[in-house]
Image (cartoon, rainbow, N blue to C red):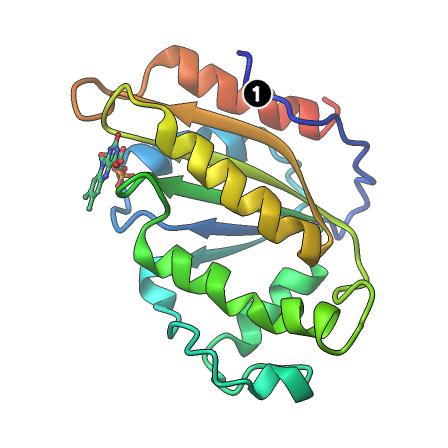
Amino acid sequence: MDDLFVRTVNMNLKNDFKILVVNSSPKKHGHTQKLLDAFLEECPKTAQIKYVLAFELNAKPCNDCGYCHKNNSCKFRDLDEFYKDFEVADLIVFATPVYNFSFPAPLKSIFDRFQRYYNARFTRNKKPPISKKRNAVILSTCGSCDEYGFEVIKHQAKSAFTVLNVELCGFVGAKNTDFEEISNDDILKSKTLASLVFNK
Ligand SMILES: Cc1cc2nc3c(=O)[nH]c(=O)nc-3n(C[C@H](O)[C@H](O)[C@H](O)COP(=O)(O)O)c2cc1C
C-alpha cells in the first residue's frame, strides 16, 4: 500500500459536502469503474456527488487562443458548468485508465483547459486563481505491470494542482488489468483510501 497516501487530510464533513467525480474511462462497467465504485461505497451518504464522464463531456482541446490572458473564463463555453462544479467541490475524484502512459485524450483536454486558471495566476496575477482550497484523489488502472503511466499521471496532476489550489491526498493504482480482473486487494485499497479521506 506504499502509494495510497500522499497526504492525510482533515475533511470538514458538513452535510452539503460536494464531490466531483471525473471518470475518463469510455467503459461504463470497466476496470476503472470498479475501482471507483469501491471508493464511492465508502463516501458519506449525505455527500452531494456530481458525476462527469469525460468521454461524454468531450471537452474541446485548448488551442491557446489567448482569450484567458484578458478574461477570467474560456472562449469555448462547453466547460462552463464543469468549471463551476470544479471550483465549488470539496473533493475531486479522478478515475482514469492509463492510455499510452498518460490520461485518455478527453481527460487531457480537460487538464489543458485548466489553462484559463494558469493564465489567471501568471498573466493576470490572481492569487490563487480559485479561492477555495480543495482536495483530490486519483484512482487509476493500467493493463500492464509497468507502473510508469501512474507516475506520469501523478506528476501531471500534481503539477496542475499547484496552480488550481488542489492538493492530491491519495492515489490508488491497479495494474495488470489486461490479464486479470481488478484484485480484491486493489478494491480494498480504494475503500481504505475513502475511509481515511473521510476519517471513518
Ligand atoms: C488506447 C489505449 C492505450 C493504452 N495504453 C496503456 C499503457 O500505456 N500502459 C498500460 O499499462 N496499459 C495501457 N492500456 C490498457 C488500459 O490502461 C487498461 O486496459 C485499463 O484498465 C482500461 O480501463 P477501463 O476498463 O476502465 O477502460 C491502454 C488501453 C488503450 C485502449
**The quadrant where residue 10 appears:** top right
Looking at the image, in which quadrant does ligand 1 appear? Answer: top left
From the image, which quarter does the C terminus lie in? top right
Along the viewing direction, whichever of 65 and 42 lies nearer the viewer: 65
User: Which residue is situated farthest in the front direction here?
Assistant: 123
Query: Residue 16: image x %, image y %?
Result: 75, 53
Query: Residue 30: image x %, image y %?
Result: 26, 38
- Please name the residue shown 66% across and 36% down the image: 44
Rendered position, 22 above or below 125: above
Along the viewing direction, whichever of 44 and 5 lies nearer the viewer: 5
Query: Residue 154: image x %, image y %?
Result: 51, 37
Residue highlighted by disc 1? 4
Residue type, label 1: Leu
Rendered position, 68 above or below 94: below
- Please name the residue shown 47% across and 78% down the image: 64
**The quadrant where residue 149 appears:** top left
Give the class, few, some or many, for how many residues have Cα within 10 Å of label 1's Cα (few <14, many ≥20). Answer: some
Residue 9 lies left or right of residue 37; in this view the side is: right
**The quadrant where residue 102 appears:** top left
- Please name the residue shown 71% across and 30% down the image: 198
Query: Residue 172: image x %, image y %?
Result: 49, 26
Residue 34 lies left or right of residue 139; in this view the side is: left
- Kind of element beneath mark 1: loop
